[in-house]
Structures are given as structure tokens and as C-alpha cells.
Image (cartoon, grey):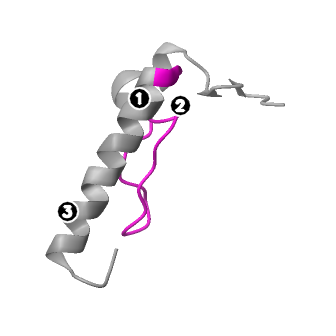
């Protein structure tokens, strides 16, 4: 059940798309997000957001070894 969205994350309305969508970098330092809520719904956008989050995690580890 998603009262203000759909089964694939936030609703796909103009106010929740493009620059208004969630970003890969979360509000908490070190928190990285991926999935249908980041780019868009579907297999390829979800996989792409996971790939980007993974690359960002590796970059963070290189900058601060031992911390993510």
C-alpha cells in the first residue's frame, strides 16, 4: 500500500520527477540510496542507480579508508 506513491516508489508526477526525485546521496553522511525512488521505475534505472551508489561507496572508501 502506498497512499502517496505507487508500487515503484514515489508517484511519477511532475513534482516528484527529475530534479525533485531522491538523489543517490542520502541526508545522513555516508548513506547512499538506490532503486526506483532514485532515477525512475524499471529494471535498467534501478540497476543504474545501484551501480552509481556502488561507485560512490568505493570512492568514499578510497577517500576515508575504514569508513563508509
Q: Is residue 58 left or right of residue 3?
A: left
Image quadrant assignment for residue 20: top left
Q: How far across and down, in percent of the image, does residue 46 sit?
A: 47, 31
Residue picked out by circle 2? 36
Q: Is residue 55 above or below residue 30?
A: above
* 9 or 64, nearer to the observer: 64
Q: Which residue is drawn at the image coordinates 55% and 16% (left, top)? A: 12
SS of the residue under disc 3: helix
- Measured as percent of width and height from the top left, residue 21 is found at 44, 32
CB under 8 Å between discs 1 and 2: yes
Q: Is residue 42 magenta?
A: yes
Q: What residue do we see at 54% from left, 15% from top?
A: 13
Residue lying farthest to the bottom in this orientation:
66
Q: Earlier in the sequence, mark 3 or mark 2?
A: 2
Tag 3 residue: 59
In the image, residue 25 sits, relative to residue 3, either above or below, namely: below
Q: Residues within 10 Å of mark 2 (few under 14, many from 20)?
A: many
SS for callout 2: loop
Residue at the (26%, 55%) spot, across then down:
56
Q: Which mark is residue 39?
A: 1
Amino acid at each position: 500500500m502506498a497512499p502517496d506513491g505507487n508500487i515503484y516508489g514515489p508517484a511519477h508526477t511532475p513534482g516528484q520527477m527529475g530534479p525533485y526525485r531522491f538523489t543517490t546521496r542520502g541526508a545522513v553522511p555516508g548513506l547512499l540510496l538506490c532503486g526506483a525512488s532514485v532515477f525512475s521505475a524499471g529494471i535498467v534505472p534501478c540497476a543504474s542507480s545501484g551501480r552509481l551508489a556502488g561507485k560512490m561507496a568505493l570512492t568514499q572508501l578510497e577517500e576515508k579508508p575504514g569508513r563508509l
